Image (tube, rainbow, N blue to C red):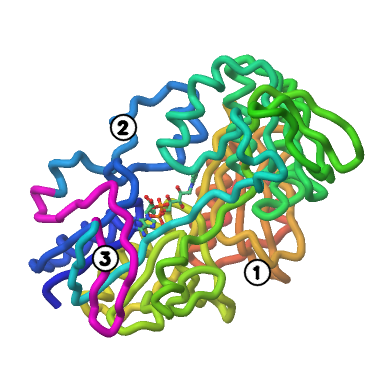
Amino acid sequence: MSHVVVIGAGQAGQTLTATLRDGGFDGRITLVGAEPEPPYQRPPLSKGYLLGDIARERLYLRPRAWYAERSIDLRLGQAASDIDTAARTVRVGGGTLAYDTLALTTGLVARTLPAEAGGTLEGVFTIRTLADIDALEAPLRAAKHVLVVGGGYIGLEAAAVARTLGADVTVIESGPRILGRVASAPTADVMRRLHRAQGVDIRESVTLERLTGTGRVTGAMLADGTGIAADLVIVGIGLLPRCAIAEAAAIETEGGVKVDALGRTSAPHVWAAGDCASFPFRGARIRIESVQNAIDMGAAVARNILGAGAPYVPLPWFWSDQYDVKLQIAGLNTGYDRVIVRGDGLPVSHWYYRGEVLCAVDGVNDSRAYMVGKRLLEAGRSPDPDALTDPETDLKSLLT
Ligand SMILES: Cc1cc2nc3c(=O)[nH]c(=O)nc-3n(C[C@H](O)[C@H](O)[C@H](O)COP(=O)(O)OP(=O)(O)OC[C@H]3O[C@@H](n4cnc5c(N)ncnc54)[C@H](O)[C@@H]3O)c2cc1C
């Protein structure tokens, strides 16, 4: 193995290449990125960076010189294509690169509204890349009426920024409640109250018929015939794994690039990690969209490329900042059958159980609950729900 090519210069790709070098790999490494920027952190794109609180340089995971110092050949602004798994080649920037080992860390692409629903009108934006923010920043500051389509994390974070910048903001969510896919109903209740207290108009169970306007967006028409005026629209309706390059090479996909517990795809010498990869976990196949997963899985796959042979086991955590409120989540909050609420108002925490087993904890302005929950999950321990609801219980005592 003398040449490792990594396709996708994001969080997972950067970690994978760094871990290869730290692990003693002294062969050639090429990191190919379609974006013109060196790998950067995306979470601030819908938070502090969009608000103008964070300088661009602080987004970069490493300065450009870091890659040169480690002999990592960083090829930016070049989309890789046409993997030939038999010949072990991939097309990059008009040429062909031969690889011994290939890793796919291609991430996700934001879902957009189709043109017939107004998705291509001027004034309609998505948030996934720095280029998206470059396009959005100035119009957002000038906007008077912002419509956010989709009440997931990115939509709600963008709504908080738009409101903080002074716009009237409406959020429409087609599901019965905001955060339907990613958090419990009690957590959604807290975030809904927060936004409404800030003056954001949150409407749930509402279907968008189409955005309106000629050339430029002027609003939206809902399925019930209601109209909403808007001079700027942010579409946050989910993300899709970037699997096309794998599919074209007949590499198996299943809700993402399909890998085994070590991170190997169906093609020999081809691995995958991060947002784009779907992997086996507790009898199911999952894909995790989070920085921590991109880092941990990128590192685990690099170690396995070097021969560690250790299955990747995620210990997920996630956060979201909206106004001055921090939501922190530990564990996988899917497949739960009840939620124990600890606290009234803020801070508050939500403890997700499957039967008697604790599977996730989220804390809203409650970093103590989050930390204790994270440690309990790491230890595979499930506290008695009655102890959690008792305000007299010192959370730290649950650790002993
Ligand atoms: C606005 C926003 C807010 C977020 N907030 C949070 C948060 O608060 N907490 C959290 O944990 N996570 C958050 N996330 C998610 C987190 O950023 C991602 O989970 C993480 O970036 C995934 O890293 P990745 O390397 O797998 O993919 P990415 O960071 O998406 O990197 C993939 C890269 O591959 C490139 N690429 C794709 N195809 C090709 C090709 N054919 N050739 C060359 N390059 C290619 C892409 O251009 C991209 O640069 C947020 C994401 C966004 C967009």
Q: Earlier in the sequence, mark 1 or mark 2?
A: 2
In the rendered structure, which amino acid carries the disc numbered 2?
Arg
Q: Residue 212: x and y, percent?
A: 75, 32
Q: CA distance from mark 1 to mark 2?
A: 39 Å
Q: Quadrant of the N terminus?
A: bottom left
Image coordinates for residue 223, horizontal then vertical, percent: 87, 43
Q: In the image, which disc is placed on residue 357?
A: 1
Q: Earlier in the sequence, mark 1 or mark 3?
A: 3
Horizontally, residue 189 falls left or right of residue 253, namely: right
Looking at the picture, does residue 272 appear above or below residue 133? below
Please report the residue visible at 23 percent of the width from the left and 59 percent of the height from the top: 94
Farthest-out residue, right: 224
Span highlighted in magenta in the image: 68-93
Residue 165: quadrant of the picture: top right
Dot 3 falls on a residue whose secondary structure is strand
Name the residue beneath numbered marker 2.
58
**Which residue lies under the disc numbered 3?**
91
Q: Is residue 223 left or right of residue 143?
A: right
SS for callout 2: helix
Q: Is residue 298 left or right of residue 89?
A: right
- Foreground disc of the pair 3, 2: 3
Is residue 306 or residue 173 the one in the foreground? 173
Front tag of 1 and 2: 2
- Above-or-below relation of 247 to 366: below
Mark 3 and mark 2: Cα distance apart in space: 32 Å
